[in-house]
Amino acid sequence: MTTPAITPASPQAPIRLTWSAIEETVHELAVRTDGDGRPETVVGIMRGGMIPAVMIAHRLGIRDVRTIEVTHTTTDDVNAAKTSTPAYKNPASLGDLAGLDVLLIDDIAGSGATLERTRRMVQALGVRRLRTAALTVNLANWNAPETPEQRIDYIGERTDTWVIFPWETCDGPLATGTPAAGQEQVPAPRAAADHG
């Protein structure tokens, strides 16, 4: 059975975030989270959410870091189509979260569906308190009736285009764009090789 794909709404050129921008955003998210009470456990949504989850856990001195694999795009390509609903694997990797104060983190929230589905799954495990965080929200793809601030407790940055993180690789053609602070310009498309 194939999963229907949804074409992303973002027409603008993608942006590539720098490590220094990520570190600054992680620091701000950690400070804001700690100000509301230090969580006992950090859960990162695989794959991209694990990196900020580990970074925030280190900043807060939290050793209990867990993961869950959830995907909502069909490939890793820039502007990849989305599946109709997020799919998750190996929910047992979360372990026993009953009675714990948990921070759930993803690298980006597009439609908000991945974070929301994972939030419901973690909440069902009997956590005492659950907060959510996203390094970035792509407002071009946000389609929830609530605003991102109503659905996500801690948001680092907002954008209106596809985001490429420093830990991602992109071998396909990319458009150029004017980068903002903390962003690098994405290389111009390469000419396709002639395999005639």
Image: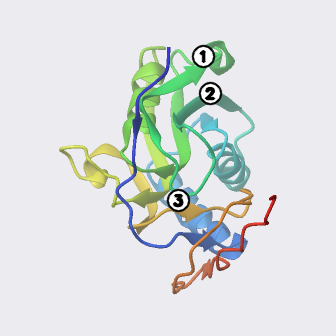
Label 1 environment density (alpha carbons within 10 Å; few <14, some 14–19, many ≥20)? some
The answer to whether mark 2 and mark 1 are in CB contact below 8 A is: yes
Badge 3 or badge 1: first in the primary sequence = 3
Determine which quarter of the picture holds residue 65: top right
Q: Is residue 3 left or right of residue 164?
A: left
For image coordinates 57% across by 19% down, the residue present is 97
- Residue 176 at what x, y percent from top left? 57, 80
Label 2 amino acid?
A: Ile
Residue 91, numbered circle: 1
Label 1 amino acid?
A: Pro
Between the C-alphas of marks 3 and 2, the distance is: 20 Å
Between the C-alphas of marks 3 and 1, the distance is: 25 Å
* In front of the other: 120 or 88: 88
* In front of the other: 139 or 185: 185
Residue 68, numbered circle: 2
Q: Which residue is mark 3?
A: 29
| Picture layout, residue 143 above or below residue 70 | below
Label 3 amino acid?
A: Leu
Helix or strand or loop: what does disc 1 sit on? helix
Q: Quadrant of the C terminus?
A: bottom right
Badge 3 or badge 2: first in the primary sequence = 3
Badge 2 or badge 1: first in the primary sequence = 2
- Residue 193 at what x, y percent from top left? 79, 66
| Picture layout, residue 173 above or below residue 181 | above
Helix or strand or loop: what does disc 2 sit on? strand
